[in-house]
Amino acid sequence: MTVTVAVTDPARSLAAAPTRSIFRAALGADFERLHPELQRRFGFSSADGIACVGTGRMDRIARGSRLLVPFLRVGARRNILFPEQGRDIPFTIANYAYRDGFGRETVTFVRTFQFARPRRFDATMVAARGRPGTVLDYLGTHQQLAVDLRLGVTARGGLVISSGAQRVASLVGAPVVPELLTGRAELHEWFDDEAGRFRIRVRVSNPVVGLVLGYQGWFTAEYPRVGAEGIPRHVRPLRECSRM
C-alpha cells in the first residue's frame, strides 16, 4: 500500500484562504451591531486596498504614579506607552491591513501623540489561532509583547476592547506575564453622530498601582487607497514574531 503525504505551507494556506477583516471574524454576528461608521472603520482587510487614517485631538492624557515614569520611559523606546501627560494634544492613528511575513492577516494601530517630543504607541493585530472571538495584539516596534484582546459591542453600537492574557513574545515559549506585572487595557470607541467624529477612551491599569496611562479624545477618519507599492514601511514593525 502506498501512502501519499501532502505537506502544506501554512503561509500559502493563509494567503489562499478568503480574506476578511479580523474584527469581523472575531465579533461574528455582533459585527453588524456596530455603528455603520465603525463597521466601515474596522471592516476592511488587506484584500480591499484601503486604509483608515484618523486625525484629531486627545482632550486629556493622564499618567499614574510618578514611580511609573522610569518604566514608561523604557517602554517609549520601543513605542509601548510613554510618560508624558497633557491636554488638547494633536493625535493621529494609522490602520493599514496587510499580510505579514507569516501570511497572517494583520492590521496596524500606529498612534502618534504630538507632544513637544512626539510619542508613538504601536501595535499590530492578528487573529488568535485556537481562541475564537479573540484578536492578538503585538505591542511595540519588535512585537515584544503579545496580548489577547476580547471584543464586544455596546447597546449604542460602540466597540469595547478588553485585554486578557499577556505573553513575552520575544522569549522562547512566550511565557505568560504574571498578573501583578501586567497593564490591563480597556478601550471604548464610538461614533458621535451629532459631532460627526469618532470618540475614544482608553485606560491602562495595574492591579497594584492602579492607573498606568489613560487618554480620551476624538478624531475624524479618511480612507485612502493603498496602491501597488503596499503599505508605508514606517507603520510596520521592525521585527515580526509568530509566538502567540
Image (cartoon, rainbow, N blue to C red):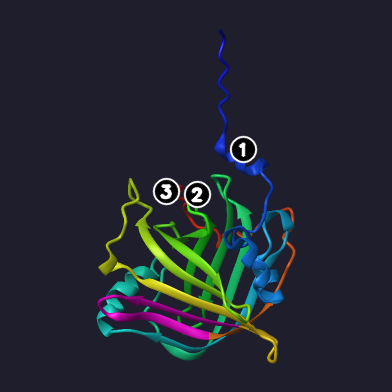
- Identify the secondary structure beneath mark 3: loop
**What percent of the width, then of the height, locates residue 125?**
53, 60
How far apart in space, not on screen, are marks 1 and 2 (Cα)?
16 Å
What residue does disc 3 label? Answer: 243
- Magenta highlight range: 199-216
Mark toward the viewer: 2 or 3: 2
Identified by mark 2, the residue type is: Arg
- Identify the secondary structure beneath mark 2: loop
Identified by mark 3, the residue type is: Arg
- Residue 12's disc is 1
How far apart in space, not on screen, are marks 2 and 3 (Cα)?
11 Å
Number of numbered discs visible in the structure rendering: 3
Q: In the drawing, does residue 226 fall left or right of residue 209?
A: right
Mark toward the viewer: 1 or 2: 2
Identify the residue at image location x=39%, y=57%. Answer: 144
Sequence order check, earlier mark of 2 and 3: 2
Identify the residue at image location x=32%, y=56%. Answer: 176
**In this rendering, is residue 40 above or below 24?**
below
Q: Which image quadrant for residue 8?
A: top right
